[in-house]
Amino acid sequence: MPVRQMTRRTLLLGTGATLLLSACGGGGTAGSDARQLGISAIPDQDPELLNRLYPAVAERFADTTGLEVAYRPVTDYTAVVRAFEIGDIHLAWMGGLTGVQARERVPGATAVAQRDIDADFRSLFIAHTDSGLRPFDQVDGLRGLAGHTLTFGSETSTSGRLMPQYFMRQAGLEPGDLKGKPGFSGSHDATIELVAGGSFEAGAVNKQVWDATVAADDIDLSKVVVLWRTPGYADYHWLARPDLDKTFGAGTQEKVLDLLLGLDRQDAEDAELLGLFGARSFVRTRNSAYDRIEDVARELGLLR
Amino acid sequence: MTLGLDAPPAPPTASAPGRKPVSGRRALLRKLVTLVAVAGLLAWSVHRALPSGSELVNHGGLALLDDLAATALHPSLEADFLGVVLDAMATTLALALLGTAGALVIGLIGGLILSDVAWAGALPWPVRVARLLLRGALVAVRSVHELVWALFFVSVLGLDPLVAVLALALPFGAQSAQVFGETFDAVPDAPLRSLRAAGAKRCSALAYALLPGTAPLLLSYSFYRFECALRSAVVLGVAGVGGLGFELTVSLQSRNWGEVWTLVAALLVLAAAVELWSNRVRSDVAVVTCADWSVGQERSGDEGRSPRGLSRSTRWSLALTVPAIAVAWWWAGLSPAGLTSARTQDLAGRLLGDLWPPALPEGGLRALTGAALDTVTMAVLAMVVAVVITLVAGPWASRPRADRRGPAAWGRWAVWWTARLLLLVLRSIPPTVWAVVALLGLFPGVLPGALALGLYTGGILGRLVAEAWETMNLKPRESLRNAGVPRVVSAVVSVGPPSANHLVTYTLYRFEICVRDTAVVGVVGAAGLGRLLSERLAAFDFPVVTSVLLASLLVSLVVEILGRRLRRALRA
């Protein structure tokens, strides 16, 4: 009996040791290097486009800072804020609302740069031509959407949900006045596709994405009509964690900012990057530029 | 996954000693009351899901469904993408394996603590209090869906494979602990007592007296859990956990239907392989089928399924378990370091601080109750869909008797394969994906959620019921027929009642799980508490998240208790 027990015990010990060893082996490859600068962006468009754009951005950031930079793709807006909060990513391309949310979660985070178009950004209300909806030029015209179906973009999109809903409220149109509940397509490309395909009669979409889609001839303009362009508001920006310089060396934030501000349309490589962003240049911005977004977000219950 | 495992009920057809005698009239009355209550619930649910005057079907979206169907025969077969798919399959498998392993460790330890037999004799009061607390904690842990666990772990651990493993291991472990505890208590404790009396130490006595008797059951259950874990690992993709679920989410977002179909095919291959393997091991080691596990029922008097000793494939499966876990560990890049890091502690503390104290959502208690009622409605309607699927596909999905020959038998086998495949497709595609598809044609609300959950649950329920029907005792039918009763009459009279009984038992059991699963379709935009939860998570409104979780816990408990009473009333 004692002999037999010994062998069993040995077997168990052996099993445990194997597990432990494999754990150590696996541990080496797991987790990210603490010195790796993580960047990410809200997935506001087709993953395909994002996967062309942000790895290129990561490469440029790496060149200018001399650091290892990794783009971490995510599937929804909230996940970017979450990853920013816990420090998996240090620099993020945020929307107006997600940026405000992230600053609320990470006090001291700063909005460093935005595109030339972001200080006066616009949303468009678009509609399928069969819906019978016609363009209008006053905010009150939104009341005409009553009784029609409508889709927003992502739930926490600034140009695809927050500001459109804000203007709808200004016009006296509540989501309950629409036909059925409003949809959340997830991204601007999806909104355009859903409206063009006739799934929803109307949609709220980011003007820059719309312009890019039209320019790329990706849409049948006989099917979709632009109803109204909203007044301007501040939107997208690069947001930096407060510990960026501490973790990656003084001047890291400045170097990234210089790179962004120095992007030049005359340079072929820069032009391609700017083209993917749908911008002519990047400019400085401040946290306070998004105060209005913050107020609207609180009003609509998207910020606590 | 399995929420409603309670004490093993006696086999429906057997007489139940020790139960109070009930008069026939009383039993009939009880059944009538139950029927009326169920009918009332159905009517209420339909009324709630289809409010008059509001639009439900989005006719415009039906064209997209056409697009989706049209690409079914043209899945994406690019080499690059196929590489991604293979990678994702391995990741999903690895995460499911690791999650199951974790759940079994929790289950064994928890099960031993919860079982009476392991303690032997009177318990000191601190142990009793601790056990009570543990029992309560386990109920709370398993009432929160894996996906919700994953969403919380992601906020603390980031995109770490630990998120998936923990999100699977915790609720599954809590469930396993309960089942294992009951299993330990169900075996005769004489060997254990004699060993203890002979002076054996407690641990060795437990190992030698308890494990041999329960090992086949534990093994069978473990493989059943693994099947569930695989399905759940795919669902977790919505939370950003890598693998097939994540790839599906991305492909759906870019509406790349070709890729979606490739991923669905990969999912089916993986699920079918795991189920075949698990079926084989389970039929080998134990008298219990998958159907029995889900309601904690042990089949007795079933000669066909007596243990035949371990076949070679089972022995190999067991021998490979440890290396497989090691490989999965390496492949997933799992590292427990994330659990203890200062950042994790910091963030966990912060999250807990944010969650407390709870606050009511906008609209107050009314909004919360409304969401809870929507959740129940969605689950009720989902069960209607699932039962219809079961009634239509279930009879064909029961394995034909092996003794038949000839072309008719071949036809029957072909139908059997088709029905099984249909059920496999329904349950292997995660409810999140069904919901995304349903939302193409229906406006957000209770209906698309119910449809998505119903399709998914139908795949599971159909299989459970079909398997239970397969093992039904046919002797009464033979006896009737031998006694000269016409074929049809003898079949209806002898097979009808027990079949209906199986259907009702499993439907009630799946209903309890369905209530919990509503969280999943809520996250992708349907309705109910799950929708409120994801909406408030997106707004980082944690106090309201807490009250939504508490409301879900309450709904789960009420449904579980009512379900148990209903099952008892129907059995009486």
Image (cartoon, coloured by chain):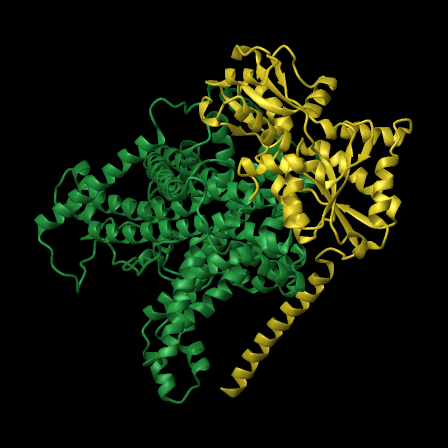
Q: Residue furthest right?
A: A267
| Side of B453 relative to B77 (left or right) | left
Residue B198 place in picture, x, y as percent: 37, 89
The residue shown at (38%, 33%) is: B411
Residue B116 place in picture, x, y as percent: 35, 73
The residue shown at (73%, 37%) is: A237
* Above/below status of A116 relative to B339: above
Residue A290 or A98: which is nearer the viewer?
Answer: A290
* Above/below status of B452 relative to B274: above
- Chain ID for yellow: A
**Residue B507, image quadrant:** top left
- Chain ID for green: B
Residue B88 place in picture, x, y as percent: 63, 45
Residue A148 or B297: which is nearer the viewer?
Answer: A148
| Side of B172 relative to B407 (left or right) | right
| Side of B30 relative to A219 (left or right) | left
